[in-house]
Image: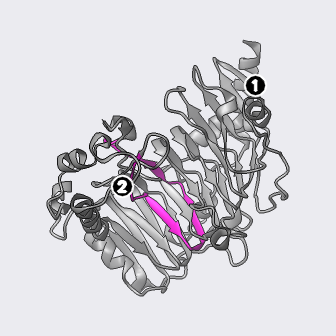
Amino acid sequence: MRRTAILAAACTAALVTIPAAPGTAAAAHGVPLGRQTLPAGDGWGAATTGTTGGAAADDAHVFTVRNRKELVAALNKGDATPKIIYVKGVVDGNTDDAGDELACEDYATGGYTLAGYLAAYDPVVWGRDTEPSGPLEDARAASAARQTAQIKLKVGANTTIAGVGHAVIKGLNLHVDKVDNVIIRNIHFQDAHDCFPQWDPTDGAEGNWNSLYDNISVTGSTHFWADHNTFDDGDNPDSAQPLYFGRPYQVHDGELDITSGSDLATVSWNRFADHDKTMLIGSTNNPATDSGKLNVTVHHNVFDTILQRAPRVRFGQVHVYNNYYDVPAGDGYEYSFGAGVQSKIYAENNFFRLGTGVDPGEIIYNWGGTAIHVTGTLVRTGGRVRPVDVLAAHNATHDPDLGSDVGWTPTLVRRVDPAVVVPVTVPLWAGAGRLR
């Protein structure tokens, strides 16, 4: 009881003395949101030339968008010319140019129906040794291509996308592909759902449904900053999906994935909530694409009821610090830190609130890695807060052991807060609408 009181007092004191979330100082000095840039030293995104997005845009390349049609037009203006796109209200990707809502049935073609697909590829009928093929799989792929053309939008180089007020981007996949210098801030991303997930009976021991879309996909790109956004599935959460063939019907992929040789990114002060696969850094085990890249900083984010990939990493030097993890129950939870092939995660001063049945030894999952550096972790279970060596907890129950030497120490960092203040400051300031 005394320990809890001391902790509460420490957190209250820290709230007074620790600065507010990054970005607030610039706003206080009168710099418009769209012209704010990633502060010097703020993670890997600040390396080399830094991340400025569209801050240098002239007046002709500053846009305010309120629907998908306007967003598409703004994204297509000027290629790599610096641009600022302010989002107001709700931009729904599943609407046509007249503003009429599009349902999954509007994308279906070639005779595709879910009922027909389930009947054709039921493992009792199709088996479990090969992926689906034939007319109904072709129809599914064609239908998916129609949805992709509607909801997957390319973001060009030197672009800032910023929300004004309560800005929502719903049912869209923003694709930052093979470009440099993009900022996305202060937006509530919701439900980038796939109408046509693919069944793969060869994926794992029991098969899996796989979907196509992230809320934000960063592929082959450099200098990226995602800050003060909220990511969730709205009224269509992963937890509400049915089971088909005994496996969850997965209509969502990641919330923010950074893959395919991307590099130099900072992910700060975001809120990720009620989701399964959340943040993938590196999508293949191919060193030719990713070796020496995928360097990402993940700091001061909330991961609330996230089942896995917070983050999962391959190859990159990834600094994960001062994040708040709320894992209310063990049911469905898989892990938070995924140590993949040649990954070099440096995790420090993170705070975990673990519900009944959640073992600290499950915070790390070994996806073929050899080492992960974890220090300063605080864990709250049953009202008690205590330091936990989560690497030792992992190694005590898993083989082979992971080492702790990842061969690097982060230098691009403005400050690392004590873990004790994380459950106060991070939930208070992280997410869309929390910039001041």
| Front position among marks 2 and 1 | 2
Q: Is residue 208 above or below residue 398?
A: below
Kindly identify the amino acid type of the residue bearing the numbered disc 1: Arg
Give residue 308's position: percent from left, percent from top. 55, 42
Q: Which residues are magenta?
A: 208-236
Q: Residues within 10 Å of mark 1 (few under 14, many from 20)?
A: some
Which element type, helix, strand or loop, lies under badge 2? loop
- The numbered mark, 2 or 1, whose residue comes first in the sequence reads 2
Which element type, helix, strand or loop, lies under badge 1? strand
Is there any visible trace of residue 32 in the rendered image?
no
Tell me where residue 40 sits by quadrant.
bottom right
* Nearest the eye: 249 or 305: 249
Residue 156 shown left or right of residue 244 in the figure: right
Tell me where residue 263 sits by quadrant.
bottom right
* Nearest the eye: 38 or 281: 281
- Disc 1 target residue: 386
Q: Quadrant of the N terminus?
A: top right
Q: Residue at x 52, y 67 (%)?
A: 218
Give residue 206's position: percent from left, percent from top. 44, 40
Alpha carbons under labels 2 and 1: distance apart:
37 Å
In the drawing, what numbered circle is on residue 192? 2
Residue 259 shown left or right of residue 6 in the figure: left
Tell me where residue 417 sits by quadrant.
top right
* Nearest the eye: 423 or 349: 349
Kindly identify the amino acid type of the residue bearing the numbered disc 2: Ala
Give residue 55's position: percent from left, percent from top. 54, 77
Q: Is residue 272 above or below residue 134?
A: above
